[in-house]
Amino acid sequence: MNHHRQGSGSPLVLIHGIGSRWQVWRPVLDTVAARHDVIALDLPGFGASEPDGGPGSVEHLADRVTGFLDAHGVTRPAVGGSSLGGAVALELGRRGVARSVTAFSPVGFFGAAGARWCRGVVTAARAGGAALGPALPWLMRTTPGRAALCGIFYGKPAALDPKDCVADARALIAARGFAAARRHLGKWRCERGMLDGIPVTIAWGARDVVLPYRQAVKARELLPRARHVRLPGCGHLPFADDPRTCARLLLETS
């Protein structure tokens, strides 16, 4: 798997969500890399990682991350994950691969309707970006354009770098692992108390449109021993909305 490695210290592995890439973690990288050997991954079929022909399920992706860690001699890292990557991080914690987990708006706490909504939102975002195509750079240079196209994922789209917005949109459009991962969204479920033996933080953006904040109530019910944090003003990808808090949560949990 393609990956970015930075810093020194105990290992901290970062896992992005569906349609994303390792660069989603850039707003927090320098801060967490001051204390950790940070490895930010591109999951198979996303970013610069080739598809592997697998099902794209949480379990399969956890297998692939475990294989990557074994191949690189990384043992019992702290793991941070976003959305689909949050579920992968939780699964790694359940398996004993991760020594701690910080999950930002993880999948696995919705019902059937929530799963349909999530699939619909991310599919519409991808289709919309593809339809706009060459107009994306021009639209992203405008505040209304970023609000319309990035407000699905961010609580403060006006503050985003237009070039990053274009690159992220193109990564979503080009992600060859998207269809497989989308089919499995909603199939993995967190089980009550399954991570009671390790430090776990669940953080949720209060302005999350993809996985609405009400799902955090289910997370509190199923993981009562975890630390649960509400991120005011943040969307589904809170790292650019509030990098200081997101970095702090990663460091405190790890």
Image (cartoon, rainbow, N blue to C red):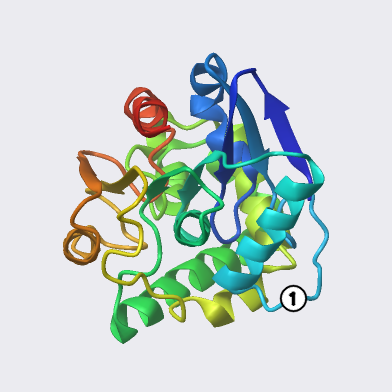
Task: Classify the position of the C terminus by image quarter.
Answer: top left
Frontmost residue, 101 versus 131 = 101
Query: In this image, 48 relative to 107: left or right?
Result: right
Q: Give the image quarter of residue 25.
A: top right
Q: Residue at x 60, y 52 (%)?
A: 20
- Say which residue appears at 50% left-offset and 27% top-offset: 27
34 or 167, nearer to the observer = 34
**Is residue 50 at least partly visible in the picture?**
yes
Image coordinates of residue 210 in percent, x first then y, are: 37, 62
The percent coordinates of residue 189 (x first, y second) are 39, 75
Q: Residue furthest top?
A: 34
Residue at point 38% right, 48% down? 104
Q: Give the total of numbered labels.
A: 1
Mark 1 surroundings: few (<14), some (14-19) or many (≥20) residues within 10 A? some
Residue at x 57% of width, y 20% of height: 33
Q: Position of residue 200 (x, y in %)?
A: 34, 46
Give how far across and how far down residue 205 sits, in percent. Answer: 28, 47
Residue, far bottom: 112
Q: Which residue is mark 1?
A: 54
Corner quadrant of residue 114: bottom left
Q: Is residue 130 visible?
A: no
Residue type at numbered disc 1: Gly
Q: Nearer the viewer, residue 155 or 2?
A: 2
